[in-house]
């Protein structure tokens, strides 16, 4: 069987997660090979909701503005009782990470955009119509067996393999990795429509035991309906044209418009028991399957890609040792599982099984409106677990998990740079590691922190952010200064004045180096960041 030269990273699957990982790796200048068994990216609509963290990861790949152009930005949800009266609403008004917390998009458009963006990278080899049918590990890495559409086979070697091969993940099966969790008994009918006549721009969630459902507006006149199947209903019954027509008539003015797709899905709440085996990593649906009630499956997959990409790049470029790769499996599962749990809880609100339960839950929500912190918890989506790691490639600072900045995503405020230009913070920080001082006096912002042993090797950038009421004045040589224009950094990064923040390329805070006593943190960092 013919073989090829060794590739640093091979990605299996050109779904959104594989394509995102390819874009990030290419942006970090890593040669990548990608195999996809189909001849094109998937055309069927699936995910419709993208969050602020995903948009920020796309920003790292230089794609946030292009993706924003295909999104209906910043929309909320209204929860309706059986009487179709609202009992709760979710309408987040904050943008801590620099993007709206919830926007609508069409997955095929995102996939096409991600695939198109890859054309700019000469280091990428993408092979559609080639299926991975075997895998072996050992020696210098991983050998994949590839089958082309004409049935011919060849072997492909790589140092690392990223299995982004979807929920049924052949690679997960070949590696004998199990999934834990459960599959919902109830199936859902998904209807995707084009040319909606309904101009209501928020999601409507029908929390009605007689027929739980969701009605989501999308960009460019699209609309998604999801309806739960009731006991005894079959796939054939609920996809019958007359049945669908009646459902649409009961839920707005869209009966009779074009139905792009109707399909019945089972939903799962499952996670792989191992996320890394040898030199193979599981990402996206291959690692976790999330019920769609929270619109987080794809978003969690994009978080996987953003977590792994810079680690692979640092190892392949010789900036860090391979130990950093172990942290992928330490960091990602906890947060992914928290989001699966959030989706399960939202499912309980959406799918009360009796009228009595519906009334009780909904009365509870109505009462909460009178308690401002509780109301805020719901309307501002504070129930969504914040991106945070409790272990992994971070330097714990001894503070408790609720208050520490370590392991959390750095806020992304709008900042003013020299010359009064305005930027999102990440545009200033660049793609690599960054060291941040939040300080009113830029020339003294890094006093007490001489050049760090790993600074030049990692290409670490020093940035001083001045509080809102302080002008930008030149800082120390090599450091950039910007101003926290709306005090968002100060508000969202409490305690930042007491420490220097070492930020990883995925925008998570790796360490808070205390100004009062930097020595211990610098020593730990030097140990962790050696090549
Ligand atoms: C109805 C529905 C609604 C959803 N809504 C949302 C939402 O609003 N928000 C959200 O975040 N998520 C949502 N999701 C989930 C989201 O669609 C998935 O999480 C996402 O598609 C996963 O992306 P992926 O790249 O991991 O896998 P996939 O999109 O499944 O891609 C895997 C790719 O790997 C390829 N492949 C598989 N095996 C091989 C092989 N052996 N060799 C080569 N190629 C292979 C496949 O052909 C495929 O192209 C929804 C899902 C459904 C079903």
Image (cartoon, rainbow, N blue to C red):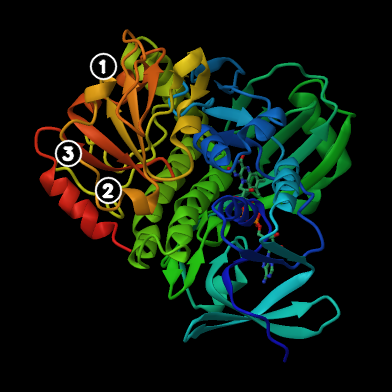
- Pinpoint residue 394: horizontal percent, then vertical percent: 27, 50
- State if disc 2 and disc 1 touch (CB < 8 Å): no
Query: Compared with residue 208, is residue 281 higher up or lower down, i.e. above or below?
Result: below
- Pinpoint residue 141: horizontal percent, then vertical percent: 50, 79
The residue at the point 44 percent across, 26 percent down is: 381
Name the side, left or right, on which 23 lies relative to 361. Answer: right
Location of mark 1 (residue): 440
Location of mark 2 (residue): 390
Location of mark 3 (residue): 400
487 or 443, nearer to the observer: 443
- Distance Cα–Cα, label 2 vs label 3: 10 Å
502 or 370, nearer to the observer: 502
Quadrant position of the N terminus in the picture = bottom right
331 or 530, nearer to the observer: 530
- Distance Cα–Cα, label 1 vs label 2: 31 Å
Query: Compared with residue 195, is residue 107 higher up or lower down, i.e. above or below?
Result: below
Query: Compared with residue 185, is residue 132 higher up or lower down, i.e. above or below?
Result: below
Query: Compared with residue 487, is residue 143 higher up or lower down, i.e. above or below?
Result: below
- Determine if residue 133 is in view: yes
Compare marks 2 and 3 and give the one earlier in the sequence. Answer: 2
Label 2 SS: loop
- Pinpoint residue 211: horizontal percent, then vertical percent: 64, 34
Badge 3: how crowded within 10 Å, few (<14), some, or many (20+)? few
Quadrant position of the C terminus in the picture = bottom left
- Determine if residue 291 is in view: no
The image quadrant in which ligand 1 is located? bottom right
- State if disc 3 and disc 2 touch (CB < 8 Å): no
Name the side, left or right, on which 385 lies relative to 135. Answer: left
The residue at the point 76 percent across, 39 percent down is: 191
For residue 97, which quarter of the picture?
top left
Compare marks 1 and 2 and give the one earlier in the sequence. Answer: 2
Name the side, left or right, on which 474 lies relative to 513. Answer: right
């Amino acid at each position: 069987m013919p073989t090829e030269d060794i590739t640093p990273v091979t990605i299996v699957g050109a779904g959104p997660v594989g394509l995102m990982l390819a874009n990030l790796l290419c942006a970090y200048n890593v040669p990548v090979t990608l195999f996809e068994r189909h001849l094109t990216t998937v055309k069927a609509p699936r995910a419709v909701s993208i969050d602020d963290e995903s948009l920020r990861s796309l920003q790292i790949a230089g794609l946030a503005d292009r993706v924003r152009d295909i999104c209906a930005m910043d929309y909320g949800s209204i929860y309706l009782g059986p009487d179709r009266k609202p009992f709760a609403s979710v309408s987040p008004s904050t943008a801590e990470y620099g993007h709206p917390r919830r926007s609508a998009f069409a997955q095929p458009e995102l996939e096409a955009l991600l695939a198109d963006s890859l054309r700019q990278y000469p280091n990428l080899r993408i092979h559609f119509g080639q299926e991975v049918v075997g895998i072996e590990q050992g020696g210098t890495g991983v050998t994949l067996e590839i089958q082309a559409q004409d049935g011919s086979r060849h072997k492909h070697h790589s140092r690392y393999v990223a299995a982004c091969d979807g929920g049924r993940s052949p690679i997960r099966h070949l590696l004998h990795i199990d999934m834990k969790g459960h599959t919902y008994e109830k199936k859902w009918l998904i209807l995707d429509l084009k040319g909606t006549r309904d101009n209501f721009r928020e999601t409507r969630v029908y929390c009605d035991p007689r027929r739980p459902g969701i009605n989501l507006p999308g960009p460019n006149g699209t609309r998604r309906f999801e309806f739960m199947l009731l006991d005894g209903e079959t796939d054939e019954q609920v996809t019958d044209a007359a049945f669908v027509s009646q459902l649409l008539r009961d839920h707005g003015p869209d009966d009779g418009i074009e139905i792009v797709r109707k399909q019945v899905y089972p939903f799962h709440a499952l996670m792989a028991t191992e996320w890394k085996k040898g030199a193979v990593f599981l990402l996206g649906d291959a690692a976790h399957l999330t019920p769609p009630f929270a619109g987080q499956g794809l978003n969690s997959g994009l978080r996987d890609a953003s977590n792994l990409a810079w680690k692979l790049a640092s190892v392949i470029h010789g900036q860090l040792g391979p130990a950093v790769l172990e942290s992928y499996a330490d960091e990602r599962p906890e947060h992914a599982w928290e989001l699966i749990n959030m989706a399960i809880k939202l499912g309980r609100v959406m799918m009360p099984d009796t009228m009595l339960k519906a009334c009780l839950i909904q009365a509870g929500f109505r009462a909460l409106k009178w308690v401002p912190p509780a109301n805020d918890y719901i309307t501002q989506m504070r129930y969504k677990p914040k991106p945070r790691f409790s272990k992994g490639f971070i330097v714990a600072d001894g503070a408790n998990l609720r208050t520490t900045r370590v392991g959390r995503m750095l806020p992304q405020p709008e900042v003013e740079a020299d010359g009064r230009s305005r930027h999102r913070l990440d545009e200033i920080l660049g793609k690599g590691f960054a060291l941040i001082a939040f300080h009113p006096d830029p020339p003294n912002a890094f006093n007490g922190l001489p050049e760090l042993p790993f600074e030049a090797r990692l290409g670490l950038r020093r940035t001083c952010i001045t509080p809102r009421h302080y002008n930008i004045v030149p800082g120390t040589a090599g450091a950039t200064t910007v101003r926290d224009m709306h005090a968002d950094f100060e508000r969202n990064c409490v305690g930042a004045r007491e420490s220097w923040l070492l930020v990883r390329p995925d925008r998570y805070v790796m360490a808070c180096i205390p100004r009062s006593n930097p020595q211990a943190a610098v020593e730990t960092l030097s140990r962790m960041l050696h090549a």
